[in-house]
Amino acid sequence: MCATCGCGDCDCEEGIVQNQGDPGQPAFINLNFVIAGAPFSNSTASWVEAGRFIFSTDIADIFTSIRVNAWVSAGTGSFRIKDLISGNVIYTNAAVTSASALNIEIRKALQIYNAASALIAVEIAGSGANTIFIGSAIFAYEI
């Protein structure tokens, strides 16, 4: 307990102290885009945000893989990962063709995302004639 401010996580000269995991330790974040059993979807060719999370290399290792549960009604759909603060597009998959709700798109050996402060968004785009669906996404650190 900090004698000066009374909090449990305080370094009175530096402010709040956050613990960082050991370098190289596996970590992941799972985003769920299903509400009341219905997955998030988009039938337009415009990018629509399905969800977002805060990321910082100050508190976590850089994610190196993604797994996205995405599928289309027919044809082709797209999803992308974007940093909303910088505007950088981190990764795009413009070739989602599976019509199975059990489809998992996997990409490894990435570097998502080397930034001290980022707001990461998952966005999807259909084609106007085809609808893309997204159920969830996992960002992971894999050795």
Image (tube, helix red, strand yellow):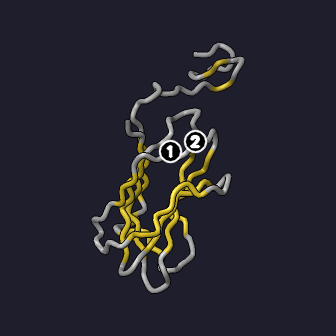
The answer for how far apart the CA atoms under marks 1 and 2 are is: 7 Å
The percent coordinates of residue 100 (x first, y second) are 28, 71
The answer to whether the residue labelled 1 contacts the one labelled 2, judged by CB atoms less than 8 Å apart, is yes
Closer-to-camera residue (56/127): 127
Q: Mark 1 sits on what residue?
A: 111
Q: Is residue 25 above or below residue 86?
A: above
Q: Is residue 16 above or below residue 38?
A: above
Residue under the point 42% across and 69% down = 95
Residue under the point 47% across and 77% down = 126
Q: Mark 2 sits on what residue?
A: 114
Labelled disc at residue 96:
none
Would you identify the image quadrant in which residue 34 lies?
bottom left
Residue 3 seen? yes
The percent coordinates of residue 78 (x first, y second) are 47, 69
The N terminus is located in which quarter? top right
Q: Amino acid at mark 1?
A: Gln
Would you identify the image quadrant in which residue 14 lies?
top right
Q: Amino acid at mark 2?
A: Asn
Residue under the point 58% across and 39% down = 56
Q: Is residue 78 above or below residue 11?
A: below
Residue occupying the far right of the picture:
13
